[in-house]
Image (cartoon, helix red, strand yellow):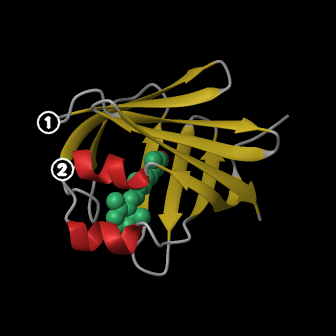
Amino acid sequence: PASLSGKWEMISNVNFDDYMIVLGISASLRKIATKLNLKKTIERQGDQFIIKTTSTFRNYTVTFKVGQEFNEFTKGLDNRHLKSLVRWEGNKLICEQTGEKKNRGWTHWIEDDKLHLELFCEGQVCKQVYKNV
Ligand code: RET
């Protein structure tokens, strides 16, 4: 069955700029970030996930257990402190990120052997698709 685990490379990225705008990310950082070819490495050990987002410019790693709220610091993104909680909903891995920004979170799922990621915040939705590498 389709698994989130593995190495992934971004093939499309829609509305990333508007997502970053609602996060309050500066124009200069957005300009760099929109040009990045992002990669993901997802490691899973049972309920525990390590998700690494990497690029030539900056990396971001988040480690969590499904169903267990954790403190997330979005270092190098918008540098906010969040309470995050990840759950499964069918084949979708869904994170709710509670903090200063409303309706913030993300959803990961596999479709047609590709990794789909929706990043949402305050009504903006960024949609990224990654291929397996
Ligand atoms: C980069 C570059 C600097 C500016 C911004 C970035 C955004 C990273 C994002 C990462 C999302 C990670 C997720 C992990 C899930 O476990 C690329 C670090 C804004 C949006 C959803």
**Residue at left 63%, top 42%?**
116
Q: Using the rendered image of the protein, determine whether residue 62 is visible from the camera's viewpoint.
A: no
Q: Would you call the spot at circle 1 few (<14 residues within 10 Å), some (14-19), or many (20 or more)?
A: few
Q: Residue furthest bottom?
A: 56
Q: Kindly identify the amino acid type of the residue bearing the numbered disc 1.
A: Glu
Using the image as rendered, state which of residue 78 and residue 44 is in the foreground: 78
Q: Is residue 93 left or right of residue 30?
A: right
The quarter of the picture where the N terminus appears is top right
The quarter of the picture where the C terminus appears is bottom right
Q: Is residue 72 left or right of residue 11?
A: left
**Residue at left 31%, top 33%?**
104
Q: Is residue 38 left or right of residue 122?
A: right
Q: Kindly identify the amino acid type of the residue bearing the numbered disc 2.
A: Arg
Compared to residue 37, the image places residue 6 above or below, namely above
Q: Residue furthest left?
A: 100
Is disc 2 in contact with disc 1, using a CB cutoff of under 8 Å? yes
x, y percentage for residue 27?
22, 67
Q: Using the rendered image of the protein, determine whether residue 97 is visible from the camera's viewpoint.
A: yes
Q: Which residue is mark 2?
A: 80
**Residue at left 50%, top 69%?**
54
Which quadrant of the picture is home to ligand 1?
A: bottom left
Q: Which residue is mark 1?
A: 100
Q: Would you call the spot at circle 2 few (<14 residues within 10 Å), some (14-19), or many (20 or more)?
A: some
Using the image as rendered, state which of residue 129 and residue 64 is in the foreground: 129
